[in-house]
Image (cartoon, rainbow, N blue to C red):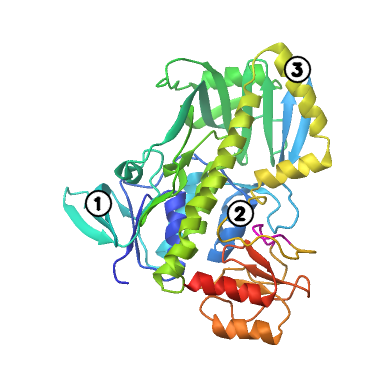
């Protein structure tokens, strides 16, 4: 293939997509209509599952060095602490939330791509495109006004909530704009009682106020300021207004100063039904947007990219049949999008609940359930995105023995001393099994799809076939693994 894949949008999702496809040797172009990457903090957190997937790129260390670890968060009401949520999930090398401004995330991804000779084409806009059986005919406008027409075999829309790719497909962005108004402040805070490695969530009678650590002395402040019928309303706060909100909802002498960014926003909950149409795909905010509660947006979009890239690379290189592989992208990621949207909506509704009686009931119930270890673990697994699974995917074969290991569709936890499954210059499945003659035959027959040798077994009575993104495809005997790989290769 000589024509490059065209990635529209160079935010964290588009950059992740570019980095993954480039790792697999797929020719790409990545364009963005903005003159420069963002200089705002925007999306602040990288969760453990995203960091695990980034291990395959070999760049996780640079991000950790540039960020700050957060170990958990405490929910407080006016009468005291309600409960605590820990991010120290088990079974991962990254038992924390990495707090890092989006401006840094984009810079590090751009540095990673530049080391491979790939540059974002800035101030280049997708004007229009026409899908065809072999991809899409696209027209781009360059900074000097020149228009370029090209053909791309695959068009990937990573261009945000106002996606030109989504509009070009005529896809409905179904959902609503919530009536609540919010303010955001990236400021320096003094006299903060909250530990510097924790989030502080305040459920006040007037509304929610949340403090996110960014770097020593610097915090993100988010607060809802009521409802309005005007869906276009967007209140731009002053530092004095932010200080008044802090004084009212988080008493304790906290002093805000030196604002880096002050903004207002509305929460949209919207999603497309399908993430693809022919050879055109959507990822990230182009496909789904939701409340920032839980900090899942950017991570969900990046994981869209991780999910699609290995599948696309196998199809482009002719190692897998498109009908057996590519339809799973929309099925898998749309289900995750539905889950994230629902969870974020529930968290927002709980935090913005009004009325003394309802708030009292909420606080009482939350204080009880947050003391239950099983509940704490479930919340932590959901927040860190380690609980994401694909049990209903067409790529998942349910059933089979899975004693001592994850079931089909679940994440395979990384094992100490082993390289990440899926690392390397080509997307390959891993088999965790005894190296029997039957298993050896599979490796000889499906060398293009498998790692060179089997990994140590979890249970000698079964084989685990694990996808290049670290999710279990099936658990069973070698014959079942062979049949799966035959179907995949077409």
Q: Residues within 10 Å of mark 1 (few under 14, many from 20)?
A: few
365 shown above or below 294: above
Residue pictured at 41% horizontal, 71% vertical: 25
Measured as percent of width and height from the top left, residue 142 is found at 22, 51
What segment carries the magenta color? 406-413
Q: Secondary structure at mark 2?
A: loop
> Which of these two is toward me, 27 or 80?
27
Residue 390 numbered mark, or none = 2
Of callouts 2 and 3, which one flags the residue occurring earlier in the amino acid sequence?
3
Measured as percent of width and height from the top left, residue 162 is found at 36, 38
Left or right for 208, reference 91: left
Residue 130 numbered mark, or none = 1
Left or right for 31, reference 250: left
Left or right for 269, reference 440: left
Q: Residues within 10 Å of mark 3 (few under 14, many from 20)?
A: some
Of callouts 1 and 3, which one flags the residue occurring earlier in the amino acid sequence?
1
Look at the image and tell me in which quarter the N terminus lies.
Answer: bottom left
> Which of these two is toward me, 417 or 249?
417
Residue pictured at 54% horizontal, 80% vertical: 446
Q: Are marks 1 and 2 in contact (CB under 8 Å)?
A: no
Mark 2, mark 3: which one is toward the viewer? 2
Tell me how far mark 1 sits from mark 3, CA to CA: 55 Å
Q: Secondary structure at mark 1?
A: strand
Magenta-drawn stretch contains 412: yes
> Which of these two is toward me, 289 or 316?
316
Residue pictured at 40% horizontal, 63% vertical: 114
The answer, for residue 19, to whether it is visible in the render is yes
115 shown above or below 276: below
Residue pictured at 67% horizontal, 77% vertical: 478
The answer, for residue 191, to whether it is visible in the render is no
Residue 360 numbered mark, or none = 3
């Amino acid at each position: 293939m000589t024509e490059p894949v065209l990635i529209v949008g160079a935010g964290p999702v588009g950059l992740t997509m570019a980095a993954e496809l480039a790792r697999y040797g797929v020719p790409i172009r990545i364009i963005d209509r903005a003159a420069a990457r963002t200089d705002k903090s925007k999306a602040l957190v990288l969760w453990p599952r995203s960091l695990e997937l980034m291990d395959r790129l070999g760049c996780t260390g640079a991000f950790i060095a540039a960020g700050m670890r957060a170990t958990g968060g405490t929910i407080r009401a006016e009468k005291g602490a309600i409960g605590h949520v820990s991010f120290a999930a088990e079974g991962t090398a990254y038992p924390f939330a990495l707090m890092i401004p989006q401006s840094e995330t984009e810079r590090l991804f751009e540095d990673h791509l530049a080391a491979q000779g790939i540059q974002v084409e800035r101030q280049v806009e997708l004007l229009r495109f026409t899908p065809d059986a072999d991809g899409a005919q696209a027209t781009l406008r360059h900074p000097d006004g020149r228009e370029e027409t090209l053909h791309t075999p695959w068009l990937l829309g990573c261009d945000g909530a106002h996606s030109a790719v989504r509009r070009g497909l005529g896809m409905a962005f179904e959902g609503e704009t919530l009536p609540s108004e919010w303010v955001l402040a990236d400021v320096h805070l003094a006299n903060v009682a909250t530990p510097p490695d924790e989030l502080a969530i305040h459920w006040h009678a007037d509304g929610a106020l949340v403090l996110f650590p960014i770097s020593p002395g610097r915090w993100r402040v988010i607060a809802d300021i009521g409802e309005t019928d005007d869906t276009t309303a967007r209140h731009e706060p002053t530092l004095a207004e932010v200080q008044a909100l802090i004084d009212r909802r988080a008493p304790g002498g906290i002093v805000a100063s030196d604002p880096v960014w002050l903004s207002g926003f509305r929460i949209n909950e919207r999603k497309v039904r399908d993430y693809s149409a022919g050879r055109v795909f959507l990822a990230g905010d182009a496909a789904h947007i939701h409340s920032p509660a839980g900090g899942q947006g950017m991570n969900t979009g990046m994981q869209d990219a991780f999910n699609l890239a290995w599948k696309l690379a196998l199809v482009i290189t002719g190692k897998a049949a498109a009908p057996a592989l590519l339809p799973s992208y929309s099925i898998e990621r749309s289900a995750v999008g539905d889950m994230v949207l629902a969870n974020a909506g529930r968290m927002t509704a709980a935090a913005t609940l009004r009325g003394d009686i309802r708030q009292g009931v909420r606080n009482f119930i939350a204080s009880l359930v947050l003391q239950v270890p099983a509940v704490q673990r479930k919340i932590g697994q959901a927040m860190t995105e380690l609980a994401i699974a694909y049990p209903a995917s067409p790529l998942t074969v349910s059933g089979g023995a899975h004693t001592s290991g994850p079931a089909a569709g679940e994440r395979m936890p990384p094992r100490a001393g082993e390289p990440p499954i899926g690392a390397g210059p080509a997307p390959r499945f891993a088999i965790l099994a005894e190296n029997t003659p039957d298993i050896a035959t599979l490796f000889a027959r499906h060398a293009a799809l498998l790692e060179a040798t089997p990994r140590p077994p979890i249970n000698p009575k079964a084989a685990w076939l694990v996808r290049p993104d670290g999710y279990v495809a099936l658990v069973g005997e070698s014959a079942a693994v062979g049949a799966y790989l035959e179907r995949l290769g077409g």
